[in-house]
Image (cartoon, rainbow, N blue to C red):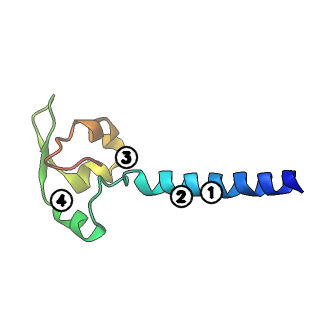
Amino acid sequence: MFFRHFVLLMLVLSLLLLSTVAATEKPENGGKLKKDSGKDMKKRCRDAHECRLYSKSDICYNPSMTHLWRKCPKKCGRC
């Protein structure tokens, strides 16, 4: 009987811990609301090596430009 209560208590505590961790993790979009993400698509991002300007939508949704994803400045928004 004691073992059953112990296992149940451990299960409840683990679920509580998982929900707490999930609530504190930062969303992938940097904490921005989904309705705000459309505004960032018009901002321009400069590639450090080629000095070209790209729109965020061109960089983030084009698989051939994955090498540029990390070079986009924070003010333009990362993918």
Of 78 and 69, the residue lying toward us: 78
Q: Amino acid at mark 1?
A: Leu
Q: Is residue 16 left or right of residue 53?
A: right
Q: Is residue 48 above or below residue 14?
A: above
> Residue 15's mark?
1
Q: Residues within 10 Å of mark 4 (few under 14, many from 20)?
A: some
**Residue of label 3:** 63
Among the two numbered marks 1 and 3 on one chain, the one whose residue lies closer to the N terminus: 1
**CB contact under 8 Å: marks 2 and 3:** no
* Circle 1 or circle 3, nearest the eye: 1
Q: CA distance from mark 2 to mark 3?
A: 34 Å
* Circle 1 or circle 4, nearest the eye: 1
Among the two numbered marks 4 and 3 on one chain, the one whose residue lies closer to the N terminus: 4
Q: Amino acid at mark 4?
A: Asp
Residue sitting at x 58%, y 57%: 16
Q: Where does residue 5 sit, x and y in percent of width and height?
A: 80, 57
Q: CA distance from mark 1 to mark 4?
A: 36 Å
Residue sitting at x 56%, y 53%: 18
Residue sitting at x 44%, y 57%: 23
**Residue of label 2:** 19
**Residue of label 4:** 40
Q: CA distance from mark 1 to mark 3?
A: 37 Å
Q: Amino acid at mark 3?
A: Pro
Q: Residues within 10 Å of mark 3 (few under 14, many from 20)?
A: few
